[in-house]
Amino acid sequence: MSRFTHHRTALTLALLVPSVLASALAQAQSAGDEAHALDAVTVVAERATTATKTDTPLTETPQAISVISSDLYTDRGARNLQETLRYSAGVTAEAYGLDTRGDGSSIRGLDPVQYLDGMRKLYNFSPMARPEVYGLERVEVLRGPSSVLYGAGATGGIINAISKRPSFQSAGEVGLQVGNFDRLQLQGDVTGQLGSSGHLAGRIVGVVRDSGMQTDGIDDDRIYLAPSLTWRGERSNLTLMASYQRDRTASSQQFLPVAATLKAPPGRKLDPSTFLGDKDFDKLDARSVSATVLFDHAFNDVVTWRSNLRYIDAKTDFREIFPDTYSNPEDPFIDADDRVLNRLTYGVKPDNRILTADNSLQFDFATGAFRHLLLAGVDYTDFREESWTFSGATTPIDIYDPVSTGVTVPAYTRLPNQRTTQTGLYVQDQIRYADRISLVLGARRDHARSQTQGLPDQTDNATTYRVGVIGDLTDTLSPYVSYSESFLPVPGQDLYGNAFDPMRGHQVEVGLKWQPSRNAMLTAAAYRITETNRQTNDPDNVLNVVQTGEIESKGFELEGAYVFDGDLTVTASYSHNEAEVTKSNFAPEVGRRLNDTPQDLASVWLSKGFQVGDELRLRAGLGGRYVGSTVSTGATSVVRTPSYTLADALLELQMPEWTFAVNVTNLFDKAYYAPCRNFGDCFSGNKRSIVGTVTYRF
């Protein structure tokens, strides 16, 4: 496909976003009065908690945030956390393609931090069990720096997954999934009131999966169990949640060489399913157990106390074999026929224990014409890791006839124990004037300490701020402007024993939120983010690292969604991002696009229901998503990975108790890479996935 065709595809989707939304919003507005009268109608998300740690309307939140409900991402065929983000503005959902090692995504070209129920889940690059999306009720994506409420975190933003909670209304379902790559999954979800007091409710969610993957010989097996209890009193609520998860898989990414994929001669391109490891060696076995306590108590109509606590115990055994493309990226072969590659091994066995606590007091009061929602809190995290590792070389392999022999598991070496603690004090005031203008002010002071066995402790103190204002220009139109900051401690020291400074980020954002009716919302945002204190190589000493790097990310986003009478749902998004390296000691990357970061993203999703009988309803969905090209800059060359456009589809038959659904992602089975890098390797994209689900509800 030519470059002109790729640009035309992006332009078509970009133009389609506002035109589709304008037409839809006009219809939604005409149906608005009826929607207000129907309590049971499905509405577009109106509120979120991630941006403020309080239950706040999106039209009073001066920062870009997306809310993806479980119904919506299930319709789109999402099977893991990163796939739930495929249609969100500004988010490269699968930044490194099909990758079982983690839910790697980027927001506005930068790294986000992954949270679960408002508390941080991941702290480093050690692989852990990935969240089970069947156990979630929604995913909230906060774009941009957000350290004021959450402390140490990356500049890109926050991905906050919200677990299913008990309901006092009885409901239950059991479902069976069958799909290609030998997918077989049994899932169930039951909730309701316990006893007759009206104070206690319970829920249990479970998944058992036996599956393969598109990568030959790789399993995708899982056991997941999540029981929970909720007690509610006159002024108090207590929720206890637990989860057990066991995954058995391996690295789905095989780091296929650029020379045999993107730049392969005719007839020599490897299939994305090619496995270059060893079936008796490669593994990613992960076990995670967690316990969570969520408590709130209203002392009166003014003061509310919230206390959240979670403990995670996670163990992982990960080892992989991958081709050595790095020694000679342009010609990695070791034989005259360009078939055989050397291979490398890597293994790690982390044992992580994570304790997180967040306590806050909320004050709801008025001073004259100003209504205050004041939040003051303290949070604490304690991350501990014991780990063992190995790396080295192993036997070569013929990539066009991959038979692995002679592989042995090297001896593991104990790594120094790691411990990271952070204590943060934060205060935030959401001030509402005349029920028309909202001012959000926030400040935070953090004390972070990093301990590595055998090295001096590293302590970082940081103060971060946030300010934003959003007002009702009309009853439906709310413009806003905001400023926010982030900091992220960088463990370790340079060659001369000097501790690294935290990476810092700050963002200025302006935007507009339009909600013409309860079931429709369109948002537009423009932003500029600066990230400083990035690590780069020391030009005076190749063994040293210095912090002179800087990235600037700027762009704009459009996102809209509506649901209106007639069971028609439309979501659309378009984003343009210009992320570039503005300072670095690696001269070739200065002034260039940030590696592996697409400039343009666009998506459209439509679903429609049709009544075909008194007790029979048909729903159909169709979506398209465009991901722009990427570059990877090396010392002497630049690797360019083409853009791609993919389609997803849904067909569902609904009956009073039964639902039959078929989801197809990458409908036309397009082969693509996401991305290829100057290191000489390519990340394969997802092939076509077909999953049929039969669900019985009771």
Image (cartoon, rainbow, N blue to C red):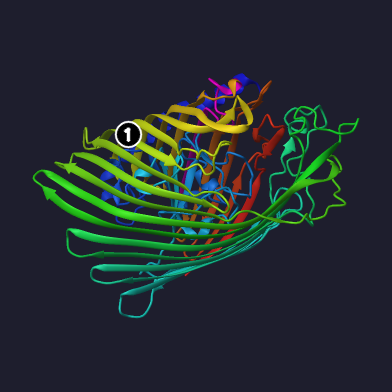
Q: Would you say 518 lies left or right of 534 here? A: left
Residue range highlighted in magenta: 588-611
Q: Amino acid at mark 1?
A: Tyr
- Left or right? Give the position of 371 relative to 78: left
Vertical relation: 197 (above or below) 686:
below
* Quarter of image, res 246: bottom right
Q: Residue at label 1?
A: 483
Q: Report the number of discs.
A: 1
- In this rendering, position of residue 81 left or right of residue 183: left
Tell me what residue is drawn at x 40 percent, y 63 percent: 309
Q: Position of residue 137 (x, y in %)?
A: 44, 56
Residue reaching furthest right?
A: 336
**Who's the residue at 71% across and 40% down the image?**
255
Q: Nearer the viewer, residue 38 or 3?
A: 3
The x, y position of residue 36, in whole percent, is: 26, 49
Quadrant holding the N terminus: top right
Which one is in front, 336 or 460? 460
Quadrant location of residue 248?
A: bottom right
Q: Is residue 517 visible?
A: no
Helix, strand or loop at label 1? It is strand
Residue 596 is one of the magenta-drawn residues: yes
Q: Is residue 549 visible?
A: yes
Outermost residue, left side: 368
